[in-house]
């Protein structure tokens, strides 16, 4: 089996359609990529992808990234053959008008569009409100002549995603649908691959990779996996808010730039000892990092891992992202590579029994 370059794997991964509850297309690519270096993986009952390195070590580290992206589900087909959708995750409705979509049809992918009325037929008042805030006002046209033709192609509950893909921008910047969070899925897979492919420097901990499901619906897969694994350490790899495109956001989210390095979240929820170890590795390896303050529990799988098992110390490593939950999410590939380097070195240096509790 020929080697596959990481960038090829990433482009294939983001081309997959992986809305919440339908993540397996991307997860199977992850499993195939890991199998090339001898790492076997399997699905658990919930649909999480699970792989382990050095399974018998006493300290268990869960390296998690959710594999689902936001999307839609088909809820109704009218007599004209138009589809009506409901959000599957946190969709900002006005951003989708005029976009192309792909529906998982009964016999394969079906193309559709969120249609837009021409300005010529709208009143001045209507032109002020072109983008609706309710999907009941934004039917999808698949070209069907009536309800019967549409129903022959599409089942109720069929998943739908926006049809936008990999677009290289200036320098090392890239835009794509669904970087939240298939870029995290790519990072953890590449971290596991590099550690498995370095037999002369075996790790001291049991590393459990989890490509989790349904994070966008309430951290569901991450919580399920943490209950089964009961990790001592939980590392959540997700996207984080870049604030350089909208400077006003800095007042709430801090100063985070594309190209400034991966984000290490800091605040009361995160384990202080792990946080210090991450910063020490970044300093020693000369890896740029950025801090983003979180005063409350995180809205990602770090929360799921800490709360599910009761004795898991957690940290979050984020990829700075512009335009989150839109069809044009944008990141810097240098931040992605630096996140991989940071995590590879961090995990490789963890002792077999790290002391993470506060001292008396």
Image (spheres, rainbow, N blue to C red):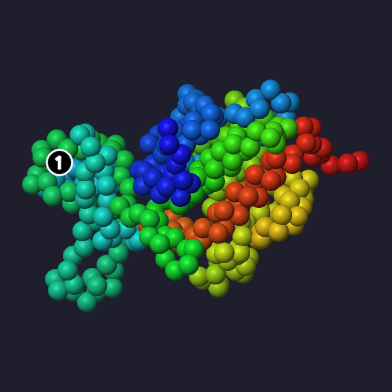
Q: Looking at the picture, how far across and down is residue 18, in whole percent? A: 39, 41
Q: Is residue 145 left or right of residue 89?
A: left
Q: Residue at x 59, y 36 (%)?
A: 197
Vertical position of residue 135 compared to residue 117: above or below: above
Q: Looking at the picture, how far across and down is residue 356, in whole percent? A: 79, 39
The count of marks equals 1
Q: Residue at x 66, y 50 (%)?
A: 342
Q: Residue at x 46, y 29 (%)?
A: 47
| Residue 307 seen | no
Residues packed near mark 1 inside 10 Å, few (<14), some (14 to 19) or many (20 plus)? many
Q: Nearer the viewer, residue 276 or 114?
A: 276
Q: Residue at x 49, y 63 (%)?
A: 172
Q: Name the residue tied to disc 1.
A: 150
Q: Is residue 307 left or right of residue 248?
A: right
Q: Nearer the viewer, residue 231 or 346?
A: 346
Instruction: Tell me the quarter of the picture where residue 98 sits.
Output: bottom left
Quadrant where the C terminus sits is: top right
């Amino acid at each position: 089996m020929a080697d596959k370059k990481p960038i090829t794997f990433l482009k294939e991964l983001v081309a997959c359609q992986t809305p919440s509850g339908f993540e397996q297309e991307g997860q199977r690519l992850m499993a195939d990529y890991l199998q090339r270096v001898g790492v076997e993986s399997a699905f658990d009952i919930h649909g999480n992808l699970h792989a382990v390195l050095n399974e018998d070590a006493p300290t268990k580290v869960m390296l998690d990234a959710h594999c689902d992206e936001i999307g839609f589900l088909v809820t109704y087909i009218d007599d004209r053959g138009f589809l009506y959708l409901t959000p599957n995750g946190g969709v900002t409705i006005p951003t989708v008008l005029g976009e192309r979509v792909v529906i998982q049809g009964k016999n394969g992918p079906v193309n559709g569009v969120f249609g837009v009325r021409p300005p010529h037929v709208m009143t001045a008042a209507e032109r002020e409100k072109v983008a609706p805030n309710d999907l009941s006002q934004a039917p999808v046209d698949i070209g069907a002549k009536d309800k019967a033709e549409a129903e022959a192609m599409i089942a109720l509950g069929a998943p739908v995603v926006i049809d936008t893909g990999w677009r290289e921008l200036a320098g090392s910047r890239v835009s794509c649908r669904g970087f939240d969070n298939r870029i995290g899925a790519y990072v953890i897979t590449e971290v596991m691959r590099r550690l498995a492919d370095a037999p002369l420097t075996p790790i001291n901990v049991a590393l459990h990779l989890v490509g989790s499901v349904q994070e966008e619906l309430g951290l569901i897969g991450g919580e399920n996996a943490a209950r089964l694994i009961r990790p001592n350490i939980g590392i959540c790899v997700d996207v984080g808010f870049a604030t350089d495109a909208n400077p006003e956001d800095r007042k709430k989210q801090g100063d985070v730039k594309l190209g400034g390095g991966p984000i290490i979240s800091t605040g009361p929820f995160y384990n202080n000892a792990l946080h210090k170890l991450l910063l020490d590795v970044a300093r020693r390896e000369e890896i740029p990092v950025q801090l983003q303050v979180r005063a409350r529990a995180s809205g990602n799988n770090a929360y799921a891992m800490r709360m599910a098992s009761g004795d898991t110390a957690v940290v979050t490593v984020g990829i700075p992202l512009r335009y989150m939950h839109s069809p044009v999410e944008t990141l810097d590939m240098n931040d992605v590579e630096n996140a991989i380097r940071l995590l590879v070195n961090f995990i490789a240096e963890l002792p077999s029994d790290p002391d993470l509790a506060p001292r008396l």
